[in-house]
Amino acid sequence: MPSVSACAPEIAADTLQKIIMVESGGNPFAVNVNKLSAGSQPKPKNVADAVAATQYWIAKGYSVDVGLMQVNSRNFKMLGITDTELSSVFEPCNNVKYGATILLSAWNMTSSKEHQNDRLMKSLSIYNTGNDVNGFKNGYVSKYVGRNISGSLAKTVVTPYNADSSVGFNADSFYGNDL
């Protein structure tokens, strides 16, 4: 797989890598069926098994998170992923692109008047739950705090492209210059 920066250059690589580790532990074939217990989750070993498991559970009416960034099946239509192209979501670089698209959409839903770090935390909540509150309530956002041994929240969560950034997060690097 190319570097995550090559797959989604608009987001800090450290941010993407942390999302990948939290979401899938780095497993490109990860499939999580929402509302199933941990012991009942499919454990595909290859793309074909991952696609089959995803199709099976979606057909049964479940929401399914797939791939490195655990892209939720409810986003497939918006991302242009059809049933015949489902295997593409398990290709690591594509999955990172899809996840980055969702994260950027979440970022765009937050207020530009808020501090950049607050926006990022709310974006992570939206990425996980679809809103900027429930990801805090369910503990998802807290998974990004303390991922490094030391550093402020901003430095713990992201590494800026711009090393001169005093806040540890460069919004221009995260979302481009259109803020």
Image (cartoon, rainbow, N blue to C red):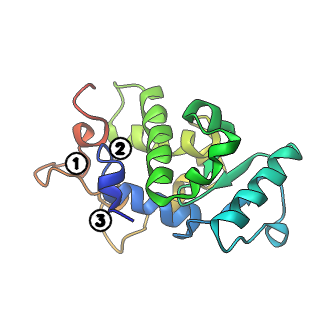
Q: Would residue 122 be seen by someone viewing this image from the given angle?
A: no
Residue sitting nearer the eye, 44 or 99? 44
Q: Which mark is residue 151?
A: 3
**Amino acid identity at mark 3:** Gly
Whether 41 is drawn above or below 160: the answer is below
Tell me the residue at 77%/52% (across/down).
34
Alpha-carbon neighbours of circle 2 within 10 Å: few (<14), some, or many (≥20)? Answer: some
Tell me the residue at 40%/37% (across/down).
119
Query: Are discs 1 and 2 less than 8 Å apart at CB?
Result: yes
- Residue 107 horizontal side relative to residue 27, left or right: left
- Residue 166 horizontal side relative to residue 53, left or right: left
Cα distance in 3D space between marks 2 and 3: 14 Å
SS under mark 1: loop
SS under mark 3: loop
Badge count: 3
**Quadrant holding the N terminus:** bottom left
SS under mark 2: helix
Q: Which mark is residue 117?
A: 2
Q: Where's residue 21, x and y in %?
A: 50, 66
**Amino acid identity at mark 2:** Asn
Identity of the residue furthest to the front in this view: 84
Alpha-carbon neighbours of circle 1 within 10 Å: few (<14), some, or many (≥20)? Answer: some
Q: Which quadrant holds residue 46?
A: bottom right
**Amino acid identity at mark 1:** Val
Q: Pointer 1: what residue?
A: 167
Q: Would residue 64 be seen by someone viewing this image from the given angle?
A: yes
Q: Earlier in the sequence, mark 3 or mark 1?
A: 3
